[in-house]
Amino acid sequence: MERVVRLSPSIMCADLVNLEKGIKELSKAGLDTLHIDVIDGSFSPSMPLGIETIKRMREVTDMNFDIHIMAHDNEFFIQEMLKIGVENITFHYETSLHVDRHIQLIRKSGSKVGVALNPSTSLSTLDYVLPEVDMICLMLINPGFATNKNEKQVPYATRKIRELKQMIEAVNPSASLQVDGRVSLDSIPQLVEAGADNLVLGSTSLFIPGNSLEVNKLNVERAVIKGIETVNNHVI
């Protein structure tokens, strides 16, 4: 089966003053998903997009909304996103006292459900919930600190991806493995080779300043192909 790697552009890296224009440009470039961070300002120090803004975004595009909740009150934001009508909701394991309840709440609504893990959170936390989710999002930097350009991916990023990929293949092969945080042109081949099949793209890949969106997308696709080819060469 041909391997598919999904590209999920982070809309917070677009021009936030001209969101509708940016959304239309992404759609025109052939991208079908928007990765949208919903941050409460407490779990993480930034608050790029409010609920009302996301409502308006829903009115101007039919692109898939991949919501990443970074908040302490997961249930509130889950309910708000379900009202808007989004395709995927991911919440953090670290801030959920009732992980299974939140999984079932999202699933019953018809949206796909994901669980996100901070860099140092052990994969063992997924032992009982992995069969129930559509996606696991691995944070490769501390969530919400992307404005610190000196912060690098954690040194164990590829190791953690490989170990999670093995777990997914054994327990829930249909689940997607998303990676988020400094997913750069340089790191994409290694991330894909390790097992990532959903890339959250930001300022070091799809939104590199000085390049057109089309050029950046082409470079991202080349980096993905390089990673897939490395896997295929290993298989041979």
Image (spheres, grey):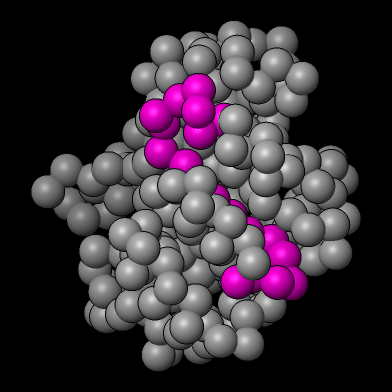
> For the view shown, which residue lies furthest in the front direction?
83
Specify whether residue 210 is painted magenta.
no
Q: Position of residue 158 (x, y in %)?
A: 53, 62
Q: Residue at x 50, y 69 (%)?
A: 115
Q: Does the magenta-highlighted stretch encompass residue 67? A: yes
Q: Nearer the viewer, residue 91 or 7?
A: 91
Q: Is residue 75 visible?
A: yes
Measuring from the top left, give residue 11's x and y in whole percent. 62, 33
Q: Is residue 186 visible?
A: no
Q: Is residue 42 above or below residue 132?
A: above
- Magenta stretch, residue numbers: 57-75
Q: Position of residue 209 (x, y in %)?
A: 72, 17
Number of marks in the rendered image: 0
Task: Examine the rendered structure and indicate whether residue 75 appears above or below residue 151.
Answer: below
Q: Is residue 162 above or below residue 33?
A: below
**Residue that appears at 47% across and 83% down:** 101
- Residue sitting at 71 percent across and 10 percent down? 210
Find residue 157 and report its horizontal and vertical position in percent. 59, 63
- Give the farthest residue toward the left: 1
| Residue depicted at 80% across the width and 66% down the height | 43
Q: Quadrant of residue 17?
A: top right
Q: Is residue 132 left or right of residue 69?
A: left
